[in-house]
Amino acid sequence: MRPCRPKTHAAFAAILLATAAGCKHAEPQLVSNTLEVQPASLSFAYDETGIPKRIGVETNAAAFRFSVNYADAEAEWLETALGEACITVSATSANRSEHDRSATVTVTADRAEPCTVTVTQRAQGSPDIFSITLSPELLEFPADGDLTGEANVVTAGSGLSARTETDDTWYTARMNGNKVVVEAAPNTAAARREGCVTVTNAQGGSAVLAIGQAGMPETFDIVLDPASLTFAASGDGLTKTVTVATQGTGITTETTADCAEWLAAAAEGNRITVTAAINYGGERSGRITVRNTEGASAPLEVTQKAAGDDGIALEPRKLTFGPEGGSKNCAIVTEGTGLTAETDAGSTAWLAASAEGALLTVSVAPWDGSGLRSGTVTVRNAEGGEAVLAIEQSGTETADLSGTWQWSSRCTTDEGWEDAVTVSGTAFVVRDGDGYTITGIAGAGIRRLGATEPEMHLVLRNGRAGISYGEAFEKDGIRYYSAAQLSFPSGIIKAWTATETFAEITVEETTLDGRRCERMTLPDLLAADSALFPDKAQLWGETGEVCYIYYETMRIGGSEIPVPIEYHRNIVLTRECP
């Protein structure tokens, strides 16, 4: 569902009605429409004011309407707004009376059964029937070992969700029925760490589950020498020894279940003896985890070669080339015979290789592009051994974009674009880490907020530059963001509010009024594919329109929804060449 942007004026959700295929009668038929709302009820705490809650509306009618009736001739205490496919409601004042108060929102559409939503605000001092109780209220984890915990959730509410702290990446949380399940990563640091999980329901109830994890005492860390082992398929050498360095006690080993049939380990003092069985099949790998009683652990990675493996080693295992291309060699080490070299199918136009004796020769064509291109060469022998050589070629470097630019765009504060105007000004582009920050692109919506230096963000990937999501500015304690928003022919509208998004720009040299200039253009169209939208196969092959938004976020039902305050299209920046 597209982001819901509440409006204080009437707005209708335009819906195309499909004509039934194969209709044999020309006379118009009276068709009943569908109308559904979700949820059927909303509840506010007595002092929960100014916080919008969403009523989702689904209908195949051309439009829907709503009205509000207050029980017991109450004065109006709700603020409402109609959006596309939703209605938002919020309490305008605290309920300091002795009784709960309620209102009914009635939603109607042509030729559809009306739907109602009951909205209640609790009285001051009355118990919150949608409150959430957690048992336990604290989950403690060791530094390593069993790193999964659960807490029971007791509530009369529905629509439970769990959210971790924004900056915490060492633990995850999810709901499993009426339990919140938390999984923590091993803590390799000495310091204890803490976090929390906020559990909410659709009715506004919430509770916080505290998370704690012990640190790993530095003096008890485990260091293995060597840290990995490689075994032959058979013959001598199927038993190897690993030294364990630690101040901890009680060394134990644990072999993963999927390799326990062929791999065994035993600890004695500060040594571990590892034994592999004869391998009659392909190459296999496993892991042995070494622990001490103080909670420290270290993994030992084990690989065993395939039966009859006359393996191949390449030195070096990677070759790099500049824009001019050329040829380079690498050594082949193998006991096998009948060596061949094969280039991957996607690189044959610019990459070639041949094997002769113990030498692999790789040739790369010149390249006038920018960024980085890569390929592989696979070397094989008649006995089935193979090795892969990685190839990378860099193109010409991307020109420095930092400096002062003049910009123009089509700008509006309404996603309908009916009132769009052309705006222009001066923008400043400065290097920022692995990309750039563009400051100064703003229209009337931004200026009304009093923001003078909103930011858009450029990132560099493989020598290419593109617009990505980022923080735009902060005003009166509220953070605003900038991002690309995409509209597809299928009707899907998606605000790209993630750092991995990337809408590639173009930079070219042109002539304006007889002067050599550089022109930077932000894309207006974007083709959807599996790389950009791996979880939305329905978009693959569609070309969407791109606009650029400044927005704030609204929390609805435990989710943060982007609410745009300004839109831009056709953004072009120019500057005179030095």
Image (tube, rainbow, N blue to C red):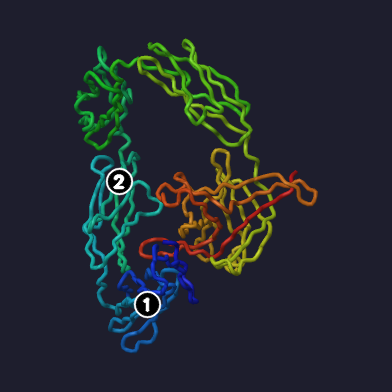
Around disc 1, counting alpha carbons within 10 Å, would you say few (fewer than 14), some (14 to 19), or many (20 or more)? Answer: few
Position in image of residue 491 (x %, y %): 46, 60
Q: Nearer the viewer, residue 175 or 392?
A: 392
Distance of label 1 from label 2 (alpha carbons): 53 Å
Q: Residue at x 76, y 46 (%)?
A: 516
SS of the residue at dot 1? loop
Position in image of residue 574 (x %, y %): 69, 51
Residue with the mark numbered 1: 111
Q: Is residue 230 above or below residue 7?
A: above
Q: Quadrant of the N terminus?
A: bottom left
Position in image of residue 126 (x %, y %): 26, 77
User: Which mark lies nearer to you, 1 or 2?
Assistant: 1
Which residue type does callout 1 highlight?
Arg
Q: How many marks?
A: 2
SS of the residue at dot 2? strand
Around disc 2, counting alpha carbons within 10 Å, would you say few (fewer than 14), some (14 to 19), or many (20 or more)? Answer: many
Q: Are marks 1 and 2 in contact (CB under 8 Å)?
A: no
Say whether disc 1 or disc 2 marks the residue closer to the N-terminus. Answer: 1
Inspect this view and state whether residue 272 appears. Answer: yes
Q: Tell whether 250 sits left or right of 396.
A: left
Q: Tell whether 356 sits left or right of 69.
A: right
Q: Nearer the viewer, residue 391 or 346?
A: 346
Which residue type does callout 2 highlight?
Ala
Q: Is residue 307 above or below residue 105?
A: above
The label number, if any, that marks residue 184 in the structure image: 2
Q: Quadrant of residue 142?
A: top left
Inspect this view and state whether residue 51 appears. Answer: no
Position in image of residue 55 (x %, y %): 37, 71
Q: Quadrant of residue 296?
A: top left
Q: Residue at x 37, y 79 (%)?
A: 94
Question: What residue occupies the far right of the structure in this picture?
Answer: 514
